[in-house]
Amino acid sequence: MMAEWKGKSKGTATGYRIFIALIQKAGIRAAYFLLVFVSFYYFLFNWKQTRIIYKYFREKHKKNRLKSLINTYRNIYIFGQTLIDKVAIAAGLEGKYTYEFDGIENIYQLAKDKSAGIMISAHVGNFELAQHFMGEFDKKIHLVTTDEEQEAIKSLLESVMAKPKVEFILVKNDMSHIFDIHKAIDHQQIICFTGDRFLSGSKTLEAELFGEKAKFPAGPFLLSSRLNTPVLFVYVMREKNRHYHLYARKAEFKNRDAQSLLGAYTKSIEKMLENYPLQWFNYYEFWEKE
């Protein structure tokens, strides 16, 4: 089975509306409390995705059955927390959170360079939250994403969120996003890719992640390896007590060698997940099966 992302996140406008109301009326803790039961519901009745994460803990982290089941629930709960945090922070409650910068100087240098900048992240932790803590840059940051939320959810979130500090470029089947990416590069702005998902029919590269082959979108690695500019791997990971930790590391790879860059990327993901195994948020068959 080919690992293939369908392009939409799971969730309903009603669910988002309930959590937004709770955050606004009763606070973040109340939203977390409700999340305990919502997560358990998804754990029990959304077995297709639950099974995928269970396999991730059993096969990639070598946990026993009980530990894998417990970690599967914890994974769902933490993912829900990152969604709540995303809404709360964007709605002006960033003072309820603390933040730690690890390698932020690499991002500031990228913003100062007289060339386009490239950052590559993954659906590990929640990179979108970084925009609310990094301050203003001289360059615009464009986040290239395949995650197409339902219009009702998108409109609902926009109604409570402050204006985002990043601009989104949505990957489309007609390839029109390529023009937006090259326009940003021509204007020496910063492009951020999530390098772990692709849409059906798009070009891919193959590499090992946790000892098993998987497919990755070719575009981010082909483009990034050919530009004469530093490439950063950037992740934002959730820690205890509403604390977020940003990591920004320079990618070491052979120039004009997309496969070399992809290999460095998969190693960086493995290292991040060794420290934060619960924050793998790809809820589909990621690893290719014969």
Image (cartoon, helix red, strand yellow):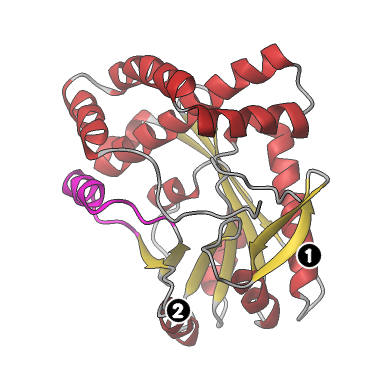
Q: Is residue 38 left or right of residue 279?
A: left
Q: Nearer the viewer, residue 117 or 207?
A: 207
Residue at screen point 71% across, 16% down: 65
The amino acid sitting under disc 1 is: Glu
Q: Which residues are magenta?
A: 147-165
Q: Position of residue 193 (x, y in %)?
A: 54, 63
Residue 79: x and y, percent? Answer: 47, 32
The crowding category of the residue bearing disc 2, from other C-alpha atoms within 10 Å (few below 14, some 14 to 19, many at least 20), is: few
Q: Is residue 68 magenta?
A: no
On screen, residue 34 versus residue 273, left or right, reads left
Secondary structure found at label 1: loop
Residue at which label 2 appears:
175
Q: Which of the marked residues, 2 or 1, is nearer the chain's N terminus?
A: 2
| Count of numbered circles in the view | 2
Q: List the residue tagged with mark 1.
A: 252
User: Which amino acid is tagged 2?
Assistant: Met
| Callouts 2 and 1 close, C-beta under 8 Å | no
Camera-nearest residue between 163 and 33: 33
- Where on the picture, by quarter, is residue 115? bottom right
